[in-house]
Every structure is written in C-alpha cells, then in structure tokens.
Amino acid sequence: MTIQLYCFGESGNAYKAALALELSGLDWAPVYVDFFNGETRGEAFRKINPMGEVPVLVDGDVTLTQSGVMQMYVTEKTGKFGGSTPQDAREVLRWMFWDNHKMSSQAGMTRFLMSFLPEAKRPEGVIPFMQGRLKAAYATLNAHLAGRDWIVGDGPTNADLSCCGYLFYPEPFGFTRADWPEIDRWLSNIEGLSGWKHPYDLMPGSPADRA
Amino acid sequence: MTIQLYCFGESGNAYKAALALELSGLDWAPVYVDFFNGETRGEAFRKINPMGEVPVLVDGDVTLTQSGVMQMYVTEKTGKFGGSTPQDAREVLRWMFWDNHKMSSQAGMTRFLMSFLPEAKRPEGVIPFMQGRLKAAYATLNAHLAGRDWIVGDGPTNADLSCCGYLFYPEPFGFTRADWPEIDRWLSNIEGLSGWKHPYDLMPGSPADRA
C-alpha cells in the first residue's frame, strides 16, 4: 500500500519526512495541502490531524504527525537512518530533538514571518531575536560538522534529514550557506545522495505557483 | 552505579528528565549546574556537553543530552513510560516532539525573558508574540485532555513528563492553570503520582537561593 504524506512544498517539516520516505525507497505519494488558503484550519483537515499541523503520514490504519515520528517510522519499517548501534541511535535522536527544539522551530517561524507574511503584519522585534537564537544553533551545528561528513556515524541518518529541513530553501530567513563552511559541505553531501531532491521538486506547491 | 543528572531547579527541560528518573525508581542524583553564574558557558562544562545545554545525563560511559533522549533512555532501562503498544509508543513520541517543537521551547524562552532577564534587556515585542504561540499550544493540549486522565493511554508516559516540564513553575510566563481546566486536572493527576516532586524540591537551586 502506498504511504500518503499530506504536505506542501514550502514546509520544511514536511520535507524532513518526505526526504526520509524518498531516500528509504518506500512506496509513498504526496497529498497536497493548500496551507496558504487555510486548508489546515478547516474541519476536514482537523479530522485528519486535530493539531492542524502539516505533515501528516497515513499508512493504512497508522496515522502519524510530527516529522520526527515519521522519520522513526521509516526506520522501523526499513532499518535505515536510525543509527547502527544503540549509542548511535541515541545520538541520532539527540540531534532530532535538538533540531526540533533549537533550530527548525525557529527557522520555520522566521522564514514564515520574513517570506510568507505581508510586511505590515510582521510583529516588531521578533525576527532579529529569532535570528540571534538561530545563529547560535548554526554555530553549534557548524562546529559539530568539522571533520565529519555526517552528523552521526559514517552515513546519512535521521539526524541529517531533520537538521537540513529548512536549509535548502531559497527564501531569506537569515541563513547563508557561505557563512557556515562545514554546514555548506555537509549540505552538499546530502545533495549528492542518490535520489535526493530539492523540497520544491519533492513535494507539490511552491511560491512560484502563487506568483 | 548512580546516574548523574547535571541540572538546576529553574530548568524545565532538566525537570522532564529528573521526573522520569525519580518516578522510574532508578538510582540517580542531581549535580548542580550554576547556570545563572555562567557555568554552562565555561570550558569545563563544554567538555561535558559541547552544546552547552542543561540537562546532561551521565550513566557510566553513556552521556546524553536533550531531555527527550533521557526520557527514552529511562524507558530503555526500565520499560516504563514509553507506551504499552507500538501505536502508543509512537503517540508518546509524537507528543514529546510536539512539546519540544511547539510548547516547551517557547515556554522556556518566554519564562526566561519575563522572569530571569533584567527588564532593560528584554527584547521588544518578543514576549507577546511567544505568548500568542503558546496560547495555541495550550489550547491544543487542553482540547486533547478532555475526557482523558493522561495524554496517551491509561497511565503516565513520557508524553506527560515532557509536556508538564514548565507548567508547575510559579514564575509568570503567561500560563495560568485556572484558564485551562483540562490541563489543570491533568497536572493534578501528575502531582498525585507516588513520588512526584515539584521542580524546586526535586533539583538543587531555585530563585529563592538568589534572592
């Protein structure tokens, strides 16, 4: 049975799940969610996910939200991306939690405020504050990647597929690859994986559709 | 061997791990980290955790950061709090990621800005913005808890021990138990668990020490 992923191109959190599904070789298909026209706030979508969030993964009678859970579900089904020892598995999970806690949560919000919300609606002071927090996160990740090709062990794991979630997008939110050489090199490693696709190629919907 | 948890009373993230350890019955002891005098920014602490975060759990040659990973480690060692079926285990993990992503990350920051940072240093506009985000998170949690005693299944899990992390603290950050009756009832359930302790009783250090 084909796994369905409710998603849209602009969602970095959806990308994390889509990329894990795609690179794992599982049979999956995207289901487009029209986020920018309010679909996630509608009653039909709330029936799929009461939290109103994208992404949602549906695999037969299994329904999941939160990209980290989906990534671990891919690992459960395929044995891929979870780390090859118990120690590595904990380290993968650590970076997934760190990303959700310290990086993607802030990056997604900052990008939304800067690139998808009309300028008149942007709350004063929030963007520079968030960018300060994000700079600390990029510095942590950049330092960790020095001398490493992957965040954990010697191949791609959910740690990489989580932390890269927002970093391929072209819309400005204060992240410039050239400023962080170790992150830049690591992102190139991910781009070099067989089957890798940019978020706007992997999932339906992009700012170009609304231009 | 006694598990060591580097922590301090004011850290809701440390509380999540401390509470899981305490309620599990594992042998553990807190190691006080003098966060407010800069200990986490010092070289000695960076050797324990290059990310500079609290909490850190040390169990023999296992060193962990991120409270979610520690909670799952407690589950790994004791079989407790992880959910009793594969489906529940995923649901527990979903709420742990949700909490890290949408609630604790914002609650911890807002409480820090409002209660631990001198008023003159508070960034303009950030607190009301964060409180708006938090209100949406409380609404999601409150709605989920209607008709339920616990977030997942019929007993306490890491989902509860994660989501409650900041909600027992007295310092203002925009959360009032009386405003959210389902959350209030659920927090009383947690307080009623055998061995439950308030963060300032479970871990060393509190604002009273600095008064």
Image (cartoon, coloured by chain):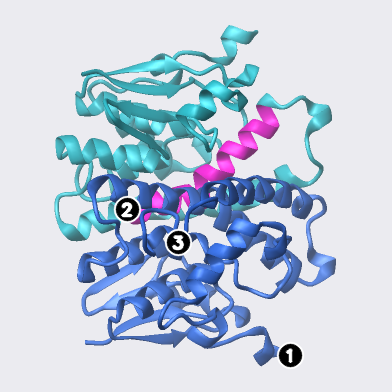
Chain colours: A blue, B cyan
Q: Chain of mark 2?
A: B
Main secondary structure type of the part rendered in magenta? helix
Residue in front for this viewpoint, A105 or A135: A135
* Image x and y of residue B102, in percent: 51, 52
Circle 2 sits on which residue? Answer: B93
The answer to whether residue A126 is visible is yes
Residue in front for this viewpoint, B78 or A197: A197
- Image quadrant where residue B59 sits: top left
Label 1 with label 3: CB-CB less than 8 Å: no
Q: Nearer the viewer, mark 1 or mark 3?
A: 3
Mark 2 Cα shell of 10 Å, populated few (<14), some (14-19), many (≥20): many
- In the rendered structure, find residue A211 and report the number of the disc placed on it: 1
* Residue at 68% in and 49% down: A135
State the quadrant of the N terminus of chain B.
Answer: top left
- Calculate the distance from the C-alpha at mark 1 to the C-alpha at mark 2: 38 Å
- Calculate the distance from the C-alpha at mark 2 to the C-alpha at mark 3: 19 Å
* Image x and y of residue A188, in percent: 55, 71
Q: Within the magenta stretch, is there residue B98?
A: yes
Circle 3 sits on which residue? Answer: A160
Bounds of the magenta segment: B93-115
* Image x and y of residue B6, in percent: 43, 23
